[in-house]
Image (cartoon, helix red, strand yellow):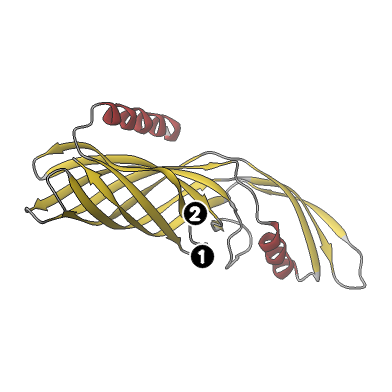
Amino acid sequence: MVRSVKLSLLLFITLLCTFTTKGQGISFSYLFPTNGYLSAPVSPFSLRGVGLDFGLVGIETGFTLYSVPGLPMEDLPFDSEKPLIGPGFATLVPLQLSLGIESKTISFKVLGGGFGLWNINPRINYGNFDRAIKTFKGWDVANADLSIENSLGIGWMAGVGFEFHVSQKFSLTTDIQYLSGGINSPLKGTISGGTEGGTIQSELVDYPDAKTLLQGIEISLGVNMN
């Protein structure tokens, strides 16, 4: 069921990009994830504001490739205040409804909808992971050797946007949105460690419910060409 919803969402976004009538905007989008590290776009792969207009109501999508230094995880048997995934790259594809008010000099809109998220070849931050294991187990040293299963993630996002009209065909844009979503990221492998002067032990671990989180603020600055 979830897989079919994700595939349907991707198909709809592809068709929307094919039959676009909205102005296309090139933007720089920055993510401030909760318990994560600042994520920045990999220029020039950020295209936002693509879609259809129906008067004051519109449908928007786009694509951003992010450089992701670190994202947190949940549904593990322990907590970590530091990111456990990264660094790496991720793609974000939004699909949102917009409700706007336009004037000759400035336009305002309210945005709301969902997004798809894909981590490209995600990596485990073993430094932070080993420290979390040490605290959880009460060990002095710890070393993890894990594999991660990657999948497509989804979430919701909402916020506001402003468009400053420089001319009839050129505008400056800024959007501020809150994002909340995640990716199912099961982990399995071994952890080894122990206390100083004690015996080093190894354990097989399996965290099938582990999830990579994306929760935080996205700020986008860009230009729109009508």
Q: Farthest residue to the front: give it.
A: 167
Residue at image point 38% right, 33% down = 5
Where does label 2 land, which residue? Answer: 213
Above or below, comparing residue 7 to residue 154 in the picture: above
How busy is the neighbourhood of tag 2: few (under 14 within 10 Å), some, or many (20 plus)?
A: many
Q: How far across and how far down the image is residue 65, in percent?
A: 45, 44
* Quadrant housing residue 97: top left
Numbered tag placed on residue 35 in the rendering: 1
Task: Give the side of residue 145 with respect to residue 76, left or right.
Answer: right
How busy is the neighbourhood of tag 1: few (under 14 within 10 Å), some, or many (20 plus)?
A: some
Q: How far across and how far down the image is residue 188, in percent?
A: 70, 46
3D distance between C-alphas at marks 2 and 1: 9 Å
Quadrant holding the C terminus: top left
Amino acid type at circle 1 is: Asn
Residue at image point 18% right, 33% down = 21
Task: Give the side of residue 218 with respect to residue 105, left or right.
Answer: right
Amino acid type at circle 2 is: Leu
Q: How far across and how far down the image is residue 150, in percent?
A: 58, 40
Q: Mark 2 and 1 residues: CB-CB less than 8 Å, in contact?
A: yes
* Quadrant housing residue 133: bottom right
Q: How far across and how far down the image is residue 29, in percent?
A: 38, 53
Numbered tag placed on residue 219 in the rendering: none
Quadrant holding the N terminus: top left
Above or below, comparing residue 137 to residue 209 in the picture: below
Residue at image point 33% right, 40% down = 62
Question: Quick one: 27 or 198, which is closer to the camera?
Answer: 27
